[in-house]
Image (cartoon, grey):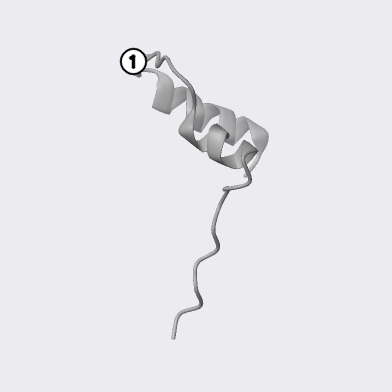
């Protein structure tokens, strides 16, 4: 996707968006830093 098209798409999505500020630590960042990151899915079948 060209950069200009991506920029335009994000601009359209965020035009009417509301900003939500969340406080506290990130659960995902905490897990990633402790070595508990993404667990691969088992193969199907």
Please state if 25 lies on the left or on the right of 1 as rendered. Answer: left
Whether residue 31 sits left or right of residue 20 in the image: it is right
Name the residue that disc number 1 marks: 18
* Secondary structure category for the residue under label 1: loop
Residue 36, percent from left and from top = 57, 48
Q: Quadrant of the N terminus?
A: top right
Q: Nearer the viewer, residue 13 or 18?
A: 18
- Say if 2 sits above or below 22 in the image: below
At 49% from the left and 28% from the top, the residue drawn is: 26
The residue at the point 39 percent across, 18 percent down is 15
Q: Position of residue 13 (x, y in %)?
A: 41, 27
> Is residue 28 depicted above or below 11 in this figure?
below
Quadrant where the C terminus sits is bottom left
The outermost residue toward the bottom is 45
Q: Residue 17, located in which quarter of the rendered image?
A: top left
Left or right: 7 as drawn, with respect to 27: right
Categorize mark 1 by other alpha carbons within 10 Å: few (<14), some (14-19), many (20+).
Answer: few
Residue at horizontal 54%, vertical 58%? Answer: 39
Left/right placement of residue 17 relative to residue 40 reads: left
Q: Is residue 24 above or below residue 3?
A: above
Residue 18: percent from the left, percent from the top?
A: 34, 15
């Amino acid at each position: 996707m060209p950069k200009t098209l991506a920029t335009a798409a994000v601009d359209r999505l965020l035009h009417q968006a509301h900003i939500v500020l969340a406080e506290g630590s990130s659960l995902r960042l905490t897990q990633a830093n402790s070595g508990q990151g993404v667990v691969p899915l088992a193969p199907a079948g």
